[in-house]
Image: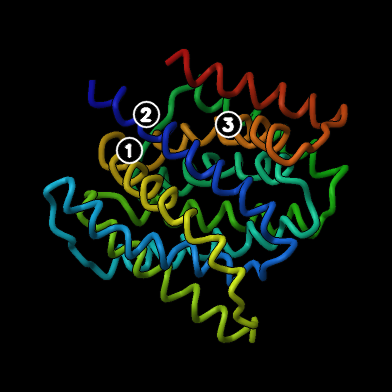
Amino acid sequence: MRGTKGFLFSILSTFTASLTAVIAKALVSDLNPLLLNAVIYTSAFLLSFPYLFLKNSKPRFTSRTLLSGISLSLYGALLYYSFLTIKASVGGLAISIFPVITSILASLLYKERLGRREIIALALSASAIALVSSVSNPAGVLLALLSSLFLSIYTLLLKDSSVETVSSVLLGSSLASWIFVVMSGAPLNASSLLAVPLGALSILGTALWIEAVEAIGPSRASLGALSYPFFVLSLSILLLKESVVLSEIIAYSLAFLSLFLVLLR
């Protein structure tokens, strides 16, 4: 039961991250990606306190979760920058390499092991990314792949955490994001307030992800992110009117097989 609940939380968190990414893609044409990132995580941090109050929990701050939040901020910054040159659907496929990276690192650091079916699913996901990378902007795909690395580090640092640390994670994300803004010299503007509502999605997604990792561990929680490209594809077609080419259809077919194998567990 705990495993099923944890996997469900990872799917729900992935959906909120997908929706945030697609809306961010629509905003990056008018907003600096670093400023967009900072506004999202700052509003999420402020919302974390009423969220924990509603759950009858008190915030808990640790150095490890602050570091996790910094990694989360780097994920957002790199992904939003990639959206300047690639479609949201391509970025979604690139992010699906995240479970592969997480599983490799978790096996080295925490001795977590995956079954044969899950390993095949990860291989299919990697093949899908390789295919779509060959027909997209290389720099944009590389940025999205790098964002996956930091998403993995974020997830691994959450091991043994609980939902009470969500404010700590988002504080780290917020502080790091504003440091990036200052270092880049990105101009502030009132239109950045359009990103404030995304903070609500971010706090919900972060809290669900922490609970998923707590319930089933980093590598198994990351398998829920195999649904990321499908959520992003559906939302980008619906909200951004993006088109899909043949190579992306093949890549998404491979990604679908990987998700199917995971859901058979």
Q: Which residue is drawn at 51% across and 70% down?
A: 38
* Disc 3 residue crowd, few under 14, some 14–19, many 20+, Cα 10 Å: many
Q: Do the residues labelled 2 and 1 touch (CB within 8 Å)?
A: yes
Q: Name the residue under label 1.
A: 212
Disc ID at residue 122? 3
Q: Which of marks 3 and 2 is in front?
A: 2
Which kind of residue does numbered mark 1 sit on?
Ala
Within the image, what quadrant is residue 64 found in?
A: bottom left
Q: In this view, does 243 lie above or below 197?
A: above
- In this orientation, which residue lies closer to the viewer: 42 or 224? 42
| Label 1 secondary element | helix
For label 2, the crowd category at 10 Å Cα-Cα, with few meaning under 14, some 14 to 19 and many 20 or more, is many
In the picture shown, does residue 237 fall above or below 151?
A: above
The disc label shown at residue 41, or none: none
Q: Which residue is drawn at 23% across and 20% down?
A: 1
Q: What element carries label 2?
A: helix
From the top left corner, tell me how far across and down residue 54 is, in percent. Answer: 18, 47
Q: How far apart, in angstroms, are the residues tagged by discs 1 and 3?
A: 19 Å
Q: Residue 205 occupies which quadrant of the picture? A: top left
